[in-house]
Image: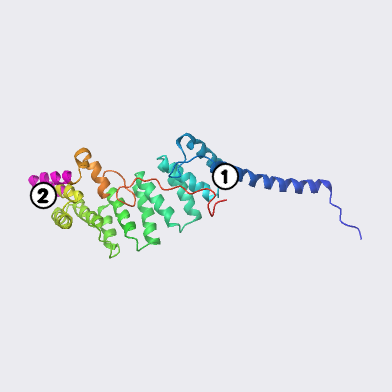
Amino acid sequence: MKRPVFSTTVLALVIGCLMLSGCGQSEEQALWDRIAELPRDETRVFKADVCDFALSQLSELLALDGEHFEARELRARTYLARGEFAPAADDLQKCLEQQPDNLELHRLRAETLTRNWSFDQAIQQWQAIVVLDGESCEAYLSLARCQLSALKYADAMKTLAEAPANCDSESAKILSASCHAKLGQHQQAVKLFSQIIAANPECAAAYWQRADSWVALGDEQMAVEDRRLAKIYNPALARNGDARIGEITGTGGTPTSLGEGSTRVPQLPSIGSEGSP
């Protein structure tokens, strides 16, 4: 019985295909290895002098493999470290398409959108987080902050009303009082801010915002006194006024993240750690 004979042409094509396949994989790995060698600072952020090159390498890798999750997440965090919030949010959205239940990435994208003043999108992202983690008090508070920033005061009140029963921190109470003030319910706002001050006589945010309600109620003298006390307990208010109060309360001024006006850059993942190629 004759053995089957393979033509040299067919054999060459098979070998060529295998080699091409191997080359493609090697090129991606070589790019990833090159990225891993780039210098970073103590927070795992690429150093300024290599950041542009790192982004170009990550983009090149993603052009070869658009499903490379680690590269896309790393590029998103690199954009975020540079303050480029829009492209960071886009990359994080693509990451979430691959890992829709990743709460950390949901939170990171929500924070990124908030810092980009994209409040409507941030609201949608926080709403998704509330669905995934309905017991998270901070998720409800962050959603309410975004709704306040988007001037959706009634929605913010509804969010706070639906928050878990243990969501009774000073920050939550300030948000609730702020909602009443924004809705023109200044007597109720003064009452709530006064309760906060009774529990914490050094709460600058409560004094500062209660002053606005005093003004609305026609009591300029009380407003002046509240602003004086607010500046004593937080001297930064004397310099920055309303811009600073936004950082304290998360209800105006500058966009905030999960916490109290945080602008931290999240840690970048370590290339070569478990789960990385």
Disc 2 marks which amino acid? Leu
State how the image is colored. Answer: rainbow
Nearer-the-camera pick, 53 or 38: 38
Give left or right: position of 96 versus 63. Answer: left
Q: Residue at x 25, y 48 (%)?
A: 248
Image mark for residue 32: 1
**Which numbered disc, 1 or 2, marks the residue that appears first in the sequence?**
1
Circle 2 packing at 10 Å, graded few (<14), some (14-19), many (20+), is some
Q: Does the magenta stretch include residue 29?
A: no
For the record, the magenta segment spans 212-232
Nearer-the-camera pick, 182 or 76: 76
Q: Where is residue 58 in the image (x, y as percent from the top left)?
A: 53, 42
Magenta span: chief secondary structure: helix
Give left or right: position of 178 versus 49. Answer: left
* Residue labelled with disc 2: 217
| Res. 144 image quadrant | bottom left
> Under tag 2, what secondary structure?
loop
Q: Position of residue 78 (x, y in %)?
A: 46, 42
Nearer-the-camera pick, 10 or 104: 104
Q: Is residue 227 magenta?
A: yes
> Under tag 1, what secondary structure?
helix
Name, please, the residue furthest toward the right: 1
